[in-house]
Amino acid sequence: MRQALRLAGWIVVTLLSAATPALAQRTAGENIDDATLATRTKGALVDADKVTAAHINVEVYKGVVQLGGFVESKAEHDAALAAARRIGAASEVVDAMVVLPGHRTIGQTVDDAALQAKLKVKLADIQGLGTAHKINTEVRQGHVLLSGFVNHTEQRTKAGQLAAGVEGAKKVHNMLAVKP
């Protein structure tokens, strides 16, 4: 009986040690540091002149800050980047913003929401993109913006191809970054 328990214990330890690298790609400290940096960056965007913080997604992975979203003007774009860089805690600030001025009609807003829903379904089907919900997708006036971090270049490429294939997509801005 003891020998069977030892064998079972050895098997569990072996399986866990083999799975540990996959499960622990990031430490708790890295997650907390990134969450703190994201909060500080979002706060800086809220405080910045000329920036509508609600338009900008902030993603952080291992100290790399990515700002993504549709902004109204080059001035808003530049002010957002400057605000993020002023924090000084990021190892890098990645620009995934697209300047797209203009307001949508109610019809365009509904069309954009339908396009985004179709896109999210397609992204969920990508092999190896079990975290498709972590890819930021925004649609404005038929323009599709993909931002966030993915594991591999192939995932970035595939997501862009799928977005381009969604009916109603006028242009795809694939700003996905491969994790450092």
Image (cartoon, grey):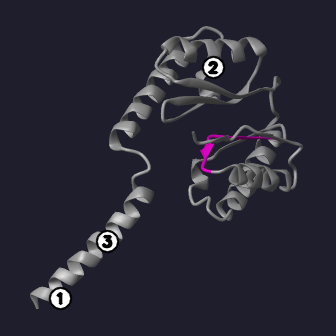
Q: Closer to the N terminus: mark 1 or mark 3?
A: 1
Q: Amino acid at mark 1?
A: Ala
Q: Nearer the viewer, residue 159 or 55?
A: 159
Residue underneath mark 2: 52
Q: Nearer the viewer, residue 81 or 93?
A: 93
State which quarter of the image contains the N terminus: bottom left
Q: Position of residue 160 (x, y in %)?
A: 78, 49
Q: Residue at x 54, y 30 (%)?
A: 64
Q: Closer to the N terminus: mark 2 or mark 1?
A: 1
Q: Neighbour class for label 1 at 10 Å: few (<14), some, many (≥20)?
A: few
Left or right, 141 with respect to 16, comes to right
Secondary structure of residue under mark 3: helix
Q: Residue at x 60, y 27 (%)?
A: 54
State the mark number for residue 4. 1
Q: Amino acid at mark 2?
A: Thr
Report the mark closest to the observer, 2 or 1: 1
Residue underneath mark 3: 14
Residue 92 to residue 83: above or below: below
Q: Position of residue 172 (x, y in %)?
A: 82, 42
Secondary structure of residue under mark 2: loop
**What distance separates the C-alpha of mark 2 from that of mark 1?**
63 Å
Q: Position of residue 139 (x, y in %)?
A: 76, 41
Secondary structure of residue under mark 1: helix
Q: Which residues are magenta?
A: 144-151
